[in-house]
Amino acid sequence: MIRFILILLQFIFLLIIATWAIRYSQPVSFVFNDVIISTSTSVLLIFLLIVILATLFSQRIIFFFQQYSLKYKFYKERTKNQKGYDAFLQGMIALVNKDFKRAVTETRNVNKYLKDESLSLLLNSETLKVEKKFNELNNIYEKMLKNEHTNLLGLRGLMEHNLRIQDYHHAFIYGEQLFNLNPRIDKLYETLLNIIAKTNNWQKLLRINDQSLKQKIINKTVHSQNKSIALYEIAKIKHNSSESEAIDLMEKAIKLRENFSPYISFYTQLLINNHKLDRARKLLAKTWKAFPHPDLKNEIKLLAKAMQISFYDLTKYITSNSISDDESKILVGESLIEKKDWEGAKNQIKSLLTHQPSKEVCLLMAKIEEGDSGNPQKINAWVSRSNLGKLSKIWVCQISGIPQSQWAPVSNQGYFNSLEWKYRDTMIELSGSGFETNTLTYINT
């Protein structure tokens, strides 16, 4: 209706102009090649209007055909794209149904109907992944890198491929690029930690750890623990060339993870090597008071030897503020056994001889009887009783559940920072010092 009114108004406007031009028409003459052409203003105006209307009509016809052509192209393109998307959908369904032949066919159809190869690459990669054709899959990931829509998938795929073939150097290169582009990808931080642990690239851990804290991927506790591990490992490398630098690094690590026995043990060794014996003595006493740990026994013995005093005398000093603790009683008892004070050792651990003493206490009693009476029956009785005693705490991998005798940043099964000081539920044979599996925390695919 509005359009009709506008056309009517335009027609009335043109009619008024034409009427006015005819009423007030004036003669007009032109000289063209010595020929005089006479006409009137009304004729000229009518001619001009006819030209304008003809031009507008022509433009309307041209515009109509252009619109029709564009609509046809759009319809054709939309139909083609729809076929491509349908092929992609059918391909994914075929993958779920493990119909690999159909999946390959639909991948070709996606290539045929879609200009952008992103979906084709994605479907092809998933097909090859399920078929375990890893060499061809690697080539697809290389192509993904060159496509802006699949760049992240390409990096992720290449990282996983190199993890699969245990090429940790290249796995980290691709993983780091992926982290720089999108650090929030699920399990990416944990995967990079495990790769770093395999390659001992602890400087990279410091950088990635700090970035992850800024991005709020990890909390401050995790950040502090992982940073302290990096400092600890760097200090172990540095101590061969510069023990003073190693000491500085260990002091930073201990500030981040106070009273942690593996750090204290290594730091004490550094202090002893640098003849800082009194400092080492105070450190062991402070740590033992806060967190008595049997892993420190070896360092106490080393320090006693360096100070040229008895193991018993140093033990008395270190346990002076924690003598009621079970670990302190065991430590003093061991020092008395070394001193061959059998009666004193027996009195020291007497309070630990409950209804069911621990395995460690039973074996200590067997050792005391061996030195004191030498009675085979009493010795064997305590050894037999130890088989029923509660096991001592040990480092246990929280993921695999397998214990090991010493703490390490990476468990023997390959898990980063997974060892916890706890009682084991069942008697499991201690795993060896080497990696038994090549397990890594992969990104979920």
Image: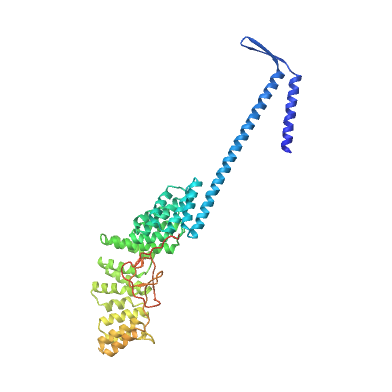
Q: Residue at x 26, y 88 (%)?
A: 372
| Residue 196 seen anywhere in this rendered image of the structure | yes
Please tell me which residue lies in front, 190 or 436.
Answer: 436
The answer to whether residue 345 is left or right of residue 190 is: left
Establish if 328 lies above or below 226. below
Instruction: Residue 413 in the image: state x and y as whole percent.
Output: 36, 67
**Which residue extends farthest front?**
101
Quadrant position of the C terminus in the picture: bottom left
Q: Residue at x 62, y 9 (%)?
A: 34
Quadrant position of the N terminus in the picture: top right
Could you say which quadrant of the image residue 187 lies in?
Answer: bottom left
Could you say which quadrant of the image residue 383 lies in?
Answer: bottom left
Instruction: Residue 287 in the image: state x and y as whole percent.
Output: 35, 72
Q: How is the image coloured?
A: rainbow
Could you say which quadrant of the image residue 251 lies in?
Answer: bottom left
| Residue 207 seen anywhere in this rendered image of the structure | no
Please tell me which residue lies in front, 209 or 67.
Answer: 67
Establish if 288 lies above or below 183. below
Establish if 165 lies above or below 258. above
Please tell me which residue lies in front, 116 or 352.
Answer: 116
**Which residue extends farthest top?**
34
Q: How many marks?
A: 0
Instruction: Residue 120 in the image: state x and y as whole percent.
Output: 47, 50
Instruction: Residue 404 in the image: state x and y as whole percent.
Output: 34, 72
